[in-house]
Image: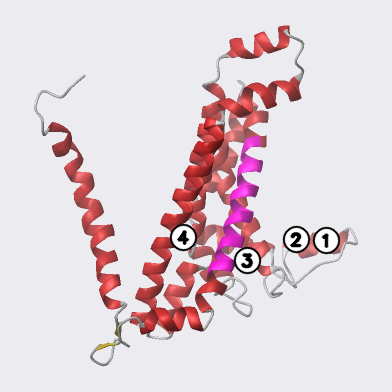
Amino acid sequence: MRPRRRFDPYWMMAPTALLLGVFFFYPLVVAGYRSLFAWDLLTPPSYVGIDNYRSLFESGEIWRTFKVTLLFSVVVVTGSMLLGLGLALGLNRPGRWAAFVRSSVFSAYVVSWVSVALLWLWVLDADAGALTHLLRKVGLPTADWLGDPDVALYAVAGVAIWKVAGYSMVLFIAGLQDIPHSLYEAAALDGARAPSRFLHVTWPLLRPTTAFVATTSLLLTFQVFDVVRVMTQGGPVHATTVFVYAIYEQIFLNLRVGRASAEVVVFFFVLLTLTALQLWVWRRRGAA
């Protein structure tokens, strides 16, 4: 159905475009401009050209931050999608018990990151935490969950999986409910068992939902900040310094506005590239 007037769609898009322009594109342009200056918020800014970008790459700081953020995102996106899909398959049924469990799992997603981080600080405390106490009771080894550079990132990623899994679960349930039941009946009549029905009916029809969940979860995890700020402050030894926390650190701790702005610009293009690459991969798989 065509609009009555030619410009009606543009007027309808105008509020969203205005919000994006004011709160997204304009700050990005300002960050790009500030990245060409050295400024400590105390003295007048001085033009340095691309020196901020050069120092980020030559020092290896941007590569280290990218590796930490990418590893964190891969662990969280993979873990939350697998857990969310498993919960969706198990809870996609009528009944009060299933509805109660679904609500309980999803409630973690709507709780603020700060509240979740404070809760898990108590659970993961190396000396008096609930997890440490439980492992000692059953005779299993414990660890300094947030103080060991080899463990801290995975501990924070586990907290993020616990919070984000409910989001994946709800979307996968919606995708499962869109699959016609007649397809399962036809597969069952042909002798297909449950694993075969999942591989040849459920999974192919869930690909659009999976692509959406993966893309949005990637964007969400790449922008994580609160849980890192509360639980580890980027440590130990920068083991959990993700992109957004590195930007925060440059501005508020080091007073390097130009360098932080350069990180913002790099961060934007990293997100843009990863999102485009992910969508391209899923489209190729869908077309195959």
Front of the two marks 4 and 2: 4
- Label 3 SS: helix
- In which image quadrant can residue 202 be found? top right
For marks 3 and 1, give the CA distance. Answer: 16 Å
Give the amino acid type for the residue marked by disc 2 in the picture.
Leu
Task: Give residue 131's mark.
Answer: 2
Residue toward you, 215 or 175? 215
For marks 1 and 4, give the CA distance. Answer: 32 Å
Q: Quadrant of the C terminus?
A: top right
Q: Residue furthest right?
A: 139
- In which image quadrant can residue 38 be found? bottom left
Task: Give residue 3's mark.
Answer: none
Q: Which residues are magenta?
A: 66-85
Give the amino acid type for the residue marked by disc 1 in the picture.
Leu
For marks 2 and 1, give the CA distance. Answer: 6 Å
Is residue 23 shown left or right of residue 93? left
**Is residue 72 covered in magenta?**
yes
Residue 143 picture location, percent across and down: 78, 69
Residue displayed at 43% across by 74% down: 248
| Residue on which disc 4 sits | 223
Is the stretch drawn in magenta largely helix, strand or loop?
Answer: helix
| Residue on which disc 1 sits | 135
> In this rendering, is residue 27 above or below 173?
below
| Residue on which disc 3 sits | 121
Q: Earlier in the sequence, mark 3 or mark 1?
A: 3
Q: Alpha-carbon neighbours of circle 4 within 10 Å: few (<14), some, or many (≥20)?
A: some
